[in-house]
Amino acid sequence: MTYQGHFITGGQARLYLATFGNCSAERAVLFLPPFMEEMNLSRAVVARQARMLAEAGYFVVLLDFFGTGDSEGEIDEATVPVWLDDIAAALAWIGQKQRSSVTLWGLRLGALLAAHYVDDRNADVVDRLLLWKPVINGHQLMSQFFRLKQMSEMMQGRGGNQINWYRRCLEGEPVEVAGYLMSSSLVSQVSALSLQPSACLDAVTVIWIEAASEKVPLVVSRLHDQWTGGRLSLEVCSGVPFWQVPDSYDAENLSVLTLKCLQEADRVCHA
């Protein structure tokens, strides 16, 4: 199933949406991408999943945040509040048609932002969250991201001083990492994010899939035990971490499991 491209007005600039399926479908899914190069590496797998969901009757929308992908803006001008506004704009566009359910589907940082959006905006238009390998701690993600800069410096023979680029960026110095110019505002805001149970999250169905895992990590298990309300389902799916591996185009087990989980959630909702 082919996709269509749309530009809509976001909080700061025009945003690009790729859509799959019938725009009048009752059930809609909005995808929120992961961070920087993970977004590029995961596009093929995400598109395959979108087509599968569309063939099952869902209207699927893939969002490029401000300053990323085909949306307008520069990444060094992006902030977490701007990206939350982008989610709101995409949801409003989706909501122009009557829907029986709207799912926020996120991968890695996109999953963390999906949960943060529901928690921060108390979004009653969202019925469920579909979280693929969610980032739990934004600080850890940023620390790992800035290691790319350190590795690049070492490979070019400039790593002897062991500069803490992450700290420099937090202190206000723009730092280019893997071709992306990072601002202190975006880095500090992402670093402050964490995934924690809350009353708002308890109000929605949460489908958490630990992709590319053989078992549930201890930190995820502890978080699951803290969740109340009984609306969090936790699944494990082995496979390749496609958001980190070039030339990875398929995650069939994950795709099948995702569709199964969404359809089961639909059945429970309409029972």
Image (cartoon, rainbow, N blue to C red):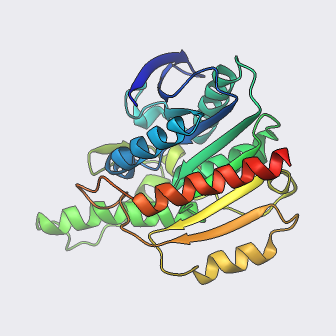
Q: On screen, 193 above or below 103?
A: below
Viewer-nearest residue: 164 or 77: 77
Residue 121, image quadrant: top right
Image quadrant assignment for residue 151 = bottom left
Exactly how many numbered labels are in the figure?
0
Q: What residue is shown at x 77% (from left), y 53% (from top)?
A: 205
**Left or right: where does residue 244 sit relative to residue 21?**
left
What residue appears at the point 83 percent right and 37 percent down from the top-left corner? 124
Q: Quadrant of the N terminus?
A: top left
Residue 127 percent location from the top left of the image: 77, 42
Q: Position of residue 174 (x, y in %)?
A: 38, 45
Give residue 51's position: percent from left, percent from top. 45, 38
Image position, residue 206 (x, y; %): 72, 56
In the image, taking residue 9 as reference, residue 246 lies left or right, namely left
> Considering only vertical position in the picture, is 109 above or below 85?
below
From the viewer's perspective, tell me whether residue 258 is left or right of residue 223. left
Residue positioned 61% across, 69% down in the render: 235
Relative depth, front residue between 84 and 16: 16
Q: Is residue 137 left or right of residue 49?
A: right
Can residue 100 be seen here?
yes
The answer, for residue 204, to whether it is visible in the render is: no
Foreground residue among 172 and 66:
66
